[in-house]
Image (cartoon, helix red, strand yellow):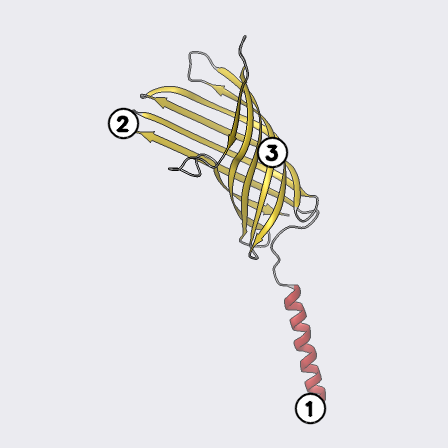
Amino acid sequence: MKKLLLIAAVAVFGLSNVNAQDEAPTFGFAEGDIFVEGNIGFNSTNDKNTEDKSTRFNISPKVGYFMSEDLAIGGEVSFQSFKTEVGGVDALDASGFGVGAFARYYFLDLGERFKTYTEFGVDYSSLNDKSGTEDVKLNGLNAGLDLGINYFVTENIALTFGLKNVLSFSSSKYDTDGAEAETNFNLGFGDVANPFGGNAAFGILFKF
């Protein structure tokens, strides 16, 4: 009888242990997963000596699909606004939107909950500048490489911190007669005093 009780106890313990392992949370992604993410960026400067001010705000929701556990592709939209004052006078007051596509690759796990990635994206944007006597539209094509990290709060929710456009190229042109395109190439994280510059973005990710 004692042997039967011991065998039963061992069996119950073993089954409980297997169930506990099956129920252990897993953090990360798998092929076929879908995620929805929203990033918010904000940058503000104020020089009281010259009365020069600038603010920049952007929000960019995106949806991605995992082709494998490390690689995701998807699309995004973005909304942004810029305002600059020089000597207390408006020099730029613009807002606009963008649409684009991206590919994201997860290349390093920093512990169980931290997942780091690099992302390449291409997008078309249109800005409307209202600082002059007439509204002027600026159209642009942008390509950029980002770095980011997800921290999984739960299996399906993660916080995101990213550095946008660590490497980037853009071409923009005002929608006016005779206007020429302006191109810009950037490599870096910002300046020494403000190493994140306007590149830092925070967000939240939902995995399905």
Say if 124 sits above or below 42 in the image: above
Amino acid marked by disc 1: Lys
Residue with the mark numbered 3: 121
Mark 2 or 3, nearer chain start: 2
User: Which-is-in-front pick, marks 3 and 1?
Assistant: 3
Give the camera-side residue of 109 and 60.
109
Q: Between tags 2 and 1, which lies in front?
A: 2
Q: Residues within 10 Å of mark 3 (few under 14, many from 20)?
A: many
Question: Is residue 136 found left or right of 77 in the rendered image?
Answer: left
- Neighbourhood count class around disc 2 (C-alpha, 10 Å): few under 14, some 14–19, many 20 upward: few
Q: Which residue sits at x=52%, y=17%?
A: 137
Residue 114 location (% of width, % of height): 55, 52
Determine contact: label 2, label 1, CB under 8 Å: no
Gap between marks 2 and 1, in whole Å? 88 Å
Q: Which mark is residue 2?
A: 1
Of residue 192 and residue 133, the one placed in the foreground of this image is 192
- Provide the secondary structure element on which disc 2 rests: loop
Whether 117 is drawn above or below 10: the answer is: above
Residue 183 vertical placement versus 30 (above, below): above
What amino acid is at disc 2?
Asn
Query: In this figure, which residue is indicated by the disc labeled 2?
Result: 49
Give how far apart the Cα atoms at labels 3 and 1 are.
67 Å
Kind of residue sitting beneath label 3? Gly
* Other-residue count near label 1 (Cα within 10 Å), few / some / many at <14 / 14–19 / ≥20: few
180 or 97: which is nearer to us?
180
